[in-house]
Amino acid sequence: MPITLYTAPDCLRCKIVKDFLAAQGAEYATVDFKADKDRFNAFYRAHRSDIYRNPEGVEFPLCDDGAVIRQGSGEIIARLLAGDALRPCVTRSDLLHGWISGLNVSACPAGQEENFKTLLRALAKGGLSVFLRSDGRRPGLLGEILAENLAARVTLDVLGPAARYPAIAGGELAPGDLARSLAAVRSHPDHLVRLLLVPYPGPDGAPTRITPAEAGQAAQMLLDACGERQLPVGIEAVPAPGLEPLEGQALLPYRSKARYALVRADIRKPQDH
């Protein structure tokens, strides 16, 4: 398939994708948005709705393979490796200045483990600091990735009690997996454990979140996994269209229920880490 890579000068993320393509022996055309501004502007106008702008402008590189457009080094290399197979675990990065996020080890589909690790190797060895997320599933793969030192920072996001995982995460949290994941995450020098309140479809299809009581059950699950009531845990809510913002005073009931099990559970602002 014909590949066109839209790049920026002195762009580390662009270099990583170019190096990956070269290693694969893939042929591709390059359009520099400054040197070839007319061609880039025409592409941008034609695909404006598909192109993401972060707070510093258009995120480079962009890749057009004739079928879809992918943007950012993580999503592009994932596409080159496995088509759309890695889409569940590789999403848009919201970090800048040498960091890359949007990488969820727990969401890696069965059979894509080697492709996911290949992606992380390309990003880390290319010079990006990888921010890896886990929700407690896939502890074996998490351990392999951390053993290779492919993640500069790792977060364990507990999404609710185990009974809610199929609806929230799209898969079951198997017995023992949370304890193994927690141990792996805590072995990393830069780690964070969160109760992350994410929206998920309720019985009527409308977005909802877990209740404070369910947050308390999730905290108890964490306590059962490590046996430490002093485990530091941040409580954070992900905003979502159709749901009232959950921050400040609105998070106090969640903190209260979580502290029955984990006395150091506290409300956390996203910029704290």
Image: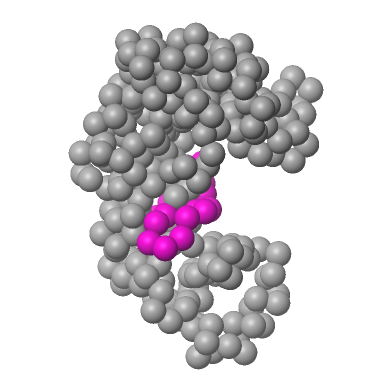
Give the x, y percent position of residue 144: 24, 36
Task: Tell me: 145 left or right of 60.
Answer: left
Taking the spot 57% from the left edge, 15% from the top edge, the residue there is: 256
Taking the view exactly as shown, the residue that stands out farthest to the front is: 249
Residue 201, placed above or below residue 4 = above
Give the x, y percent position of residue 184: 28, 29
Q: Quarter of the image holding residue 122?
A: bottom left
Given residues 55 and 170, the one toward you in this image is 55
Given residues 244 and 205, the one toward you in this image is 244
Task: Tell me: 128 left or right of 36.
Answer: left
> Which of the image's four quarters has the C terminus?
top left
Task: Tell me: 120 left or right of 104.
Answer: left
Taking the spot 35% from the left edge, 51% from the top edge, the residue there is: 130
Query: Magenta stretch?
Result: 78-100
Q: Is residue 201 visible?
A: no
Query: Coloring scheme of the render?
Result: one colour
Taking the spot 49% from the left edge, 9% from the top edge, the residue there is: 260
Queried whether the magenta region covers residue 127, the answer comes back as no
Taking the spot 52% from the left edge, 49% from the top edge, the residue there is: 91
Q: Is residue 92 visible?
A: yes
Majority secondary structure in the magenta region: loop
Queried whether the magenta region covers residue 88, the answer comes back as yes
Give the x, y percent position of residue 185: 31, 31
Give the x, y percent position of residue 253: 63, 18
Given residues 234 and 34, the one toward you in this image is 234
Q: Quarter of the image holding residue 240?
A: top right
The number of callouts visible is 0
Residue 12, placed above or below residue 195 = below
Residue 60, placed above or below residue 88 = below
